[in-house]
């Protein structure tokens, strides 16, 4: 693996990995506040502004569904620039239909969870592929446009992705559209040096995106970006996948449990 120190970045050229939450249960729950179609209109305008800021900028969009996740747009792919929006929307529609066809058997009570761990892993894999493509790289960053509540069962996978991003010096920005804050993404943005934002007015989403998340990493040092008031560092236990305030930690493998166990179920 190429050492992190040997990577050479171009200061004002960005590789933006955008993770879009397409969980239908979440969007149905906030349809009166922000419809999915209006959300996409704001996101498309934001993506176009990123590509207009620098002709070398690259945008990759990953859909984070309820059952799966997939790449739906890559600005570096050869295509008609006038049909970017049409191609993205068509692939997104195909993905949503495919994601719904993979429906789970268990019933859903509430907005449900999105596969955030999977989309973060796909974004990091793409970034590593870019790192190996040549000696000069755009500066990568990940933007999570998320609304679904945290899935406690994904805690370990998400934390592994966060630490991988930290080692690769890839900031994870978070824009939360749900009613509650995301403890996972609060930790992700804090650990990787990204920006965490929960807009107060979703009808002005494009203004939030363009003023906070459009600037490249080099320019951020000259700006006063929002800082989180507090970060929820609570972990999820390995036994029941519940978020806990206090627990028991295995001294060998550092597994977390909500109750005392004579023998660690992870390492034995």
Image (spheres, grey):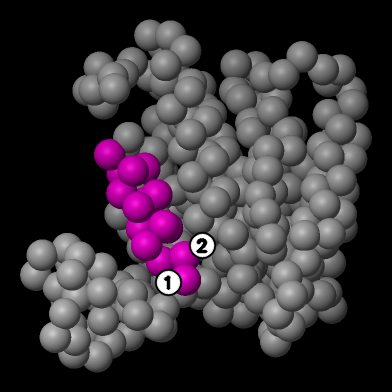
Quarter-of-image position of residue 70: top right
Q: Could you tell me if the residues under marks 2 and 1 are in contact, i.e. CB atoms within 8 Å?
A: no
Q: Nearer the viewer, residue 65 or 218?
A: 65
**Residue picked out by circle 1:** 183
What span is in magenta? 153-167
Task: Answer left or right for 89 relative to 246.
Answer: right
Report x, y in % for residue 244.
Answer: 32, 85
| Residue 187 picture quarter | bottom left
Q: Is residue 54 left or right of residue 162?
A: right
The structure residue drawn at horizontal position 60% and vertical position 16%, both measured from the top left corner, is 56
Residue, disc 2:
197
Identify the residue shown where x is 77% and y is 79%. Answer: 29
Residue extending farthest to the left is 251
Secondary structure, mark 1, is helix
Real-space CA distance between mark 2 and mark 1, rounded to the nearest whole angstrom:
12 Å
Q: Quadrant of residue 88?
A: top right
Q: Give above or below for 127 relative to 89.
A: above
Residue 19, x across and y down, in percent: 61, 48
Q: Is residue 135 visible?
A: yes
Q: Earlier in the sequence, mark 2 or mark 1?
A: 1
**Left or right, 2 with reference to 267:** right
Does the magenta stretch mainly form a helix, a strand or a loop?
helix
Crowd rating for badge 1 (residues with CA inside 10 Å; few <14, some 14–19, many 20+): some
The residue nearer to you, when weighing 218 against 258, is 258
């Amino acid at each position: 693996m190429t050492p992190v120190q040997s990577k050479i970045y171009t200061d004002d050229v960005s590789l933006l990995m955008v993770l879009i939450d397409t969980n239908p249960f979440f969007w149905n729950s906030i349809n009166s506040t922000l419809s999915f179609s209006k959300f996409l209109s704001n996101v498309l305008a934001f993506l176009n502004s990123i590509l207009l800021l620098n002709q070398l900028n690259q945008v990759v969009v990953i859909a984070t569904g309820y059952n799966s996740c997939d790449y739906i747009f890559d600005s570096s792919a050869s295509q008609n620039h006038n049909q970017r929006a049409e191609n993205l929307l068509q692939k997104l529609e195909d993905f949503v239909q495919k994601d719904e066809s993979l429906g789970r058997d268990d019933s859903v009570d509430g907005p449900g969870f999105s596969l955030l761990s999977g989309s973060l892993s796909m974004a990091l894999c793409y970034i590593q592929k870019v790192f190996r493509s040549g000696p000069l790289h755009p500066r990568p960053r990940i933007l999570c446009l998320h609304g679904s509540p945290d899935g406690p069962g994904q805690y370990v996978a998400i934390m592994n992705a966060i630490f991988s991003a930290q080692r690769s010096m890839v900031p994870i920005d978070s824009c939360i559209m749900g009613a509650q804050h995301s403890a996972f993404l609060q930790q992700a943005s804090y650990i990787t040096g990204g920006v965490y934002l929960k807009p107060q007015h979703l009808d002005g989403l494009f203004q939030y995106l363009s003023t906070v998340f459009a600037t490249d990493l080099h320019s951020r040092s000259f700006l006063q970006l929002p800082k989180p008031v507090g970060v929820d560092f609570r972990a999820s236990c390995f036994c029941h996948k519940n978020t806990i305030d206090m627990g028991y930690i295995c001294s060998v493998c550092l597994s977390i449990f909500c109750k005392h166990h004579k023998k660690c179920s992870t390492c034995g």
